[in-house]
């Protein structure tokens, strides 16, 4: 329960920081990894190899996108840290979920950003609401990760 709350709070902090500054502090993925390791140390993780492999696969898949400037480094680290928590069993759902939610988020965020920019032209807006800004992809990463984590936690509690 405490681990799930910490996971959710860290994802929320990442999303908020990404919206405000288009930056996810390194401390957030680091704390996610540390929290996972702490949970693993107390026997709360089965199949440790699968969890580590999921993180490595995400890094291998997304580092080229970071190198091409198609995805931010904070997004890559956040997604890798959440993949560590979710493991190989949920990795395909995580990647597909983030892609789908990312598209839906963009479809909502871009018109919102345009409307806010037109309505408040003289205001200082958060970085992600600037007209030429990148999308704060920490939001769909956080939502997809939290949904999958809560689903996994419910299955463990429910015995399924």
Image: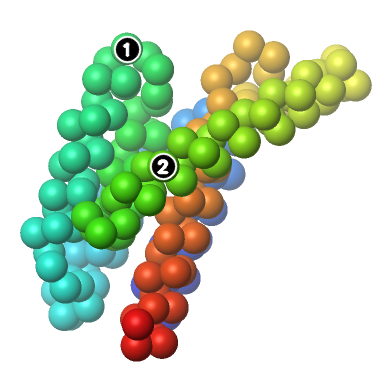
> Visible in this render: residue 85?
yes
Real-space Cα separation, disc 1 to disc 2, in angstroms: 21 Å
Q: Which residue is mark 1?
A: 68
User: In this figure, which colouring scheme has been used for the structure?
Assistant: rainbow
Residue drawn at point x = 55 percent, y = 20 percent? 134
Q: Quadrant of the C terminus?
A: bottom left
Sequence-wise, the earlier of marks 1 and 2 is: 1
Residue drawn at point x = 78 percent, y = 19 percent? 114
Name the front one of labels 1 and 2.
Answer: 2
Residue drawn at point x = 24 percent, y = 25 percent? 63
Q: Residues within 10 Å of mark 2 (few under 14, many from 20)?
A: few
Given residues 43 and 101, the one toward you in this image is 101
> Visible in this render: residue 21?
no
Q: Which residue is mark 2?
A: 96
Q: Quadrant of the N terminus?
A: bottom left
Judging from the image, what secondary structure is the residue with disc 1 in? loop
């Amino acid at each position: 329960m405490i681990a799930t709350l910490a996971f959710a709070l860290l994802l929320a902090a990442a999303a908020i920081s990404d919206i405000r500054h288009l930056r996810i502090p390194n401390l957030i993925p680091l704390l996610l990894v540390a929290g996972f390791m702490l949970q693993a140390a107390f026997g709360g993780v089965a199949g440790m190899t699968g969890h580590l492999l999921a993180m490595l696969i995400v890094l291998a898949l997304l580092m080229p996108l970071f190198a091409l400037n198609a995805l931010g480094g904070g997004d890559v680290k956040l997604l890798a840290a959440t993949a560590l928590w979710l493991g190989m069993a949920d990795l395909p759902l995580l990647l597909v979920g983030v892609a789908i939610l990312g598209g839906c988020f963009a479809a909502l965020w871009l018109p919102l950003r345009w409307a806010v920019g037109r309505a408040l032209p003289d205001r200082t807006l958060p970085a992600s609401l600037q007209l030429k800004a990148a999308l704060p992809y920490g939001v769909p990463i956080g939502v997809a990760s939290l949904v999958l984590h809560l689903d996994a936690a419910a299955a463990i509690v429910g015995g399924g």
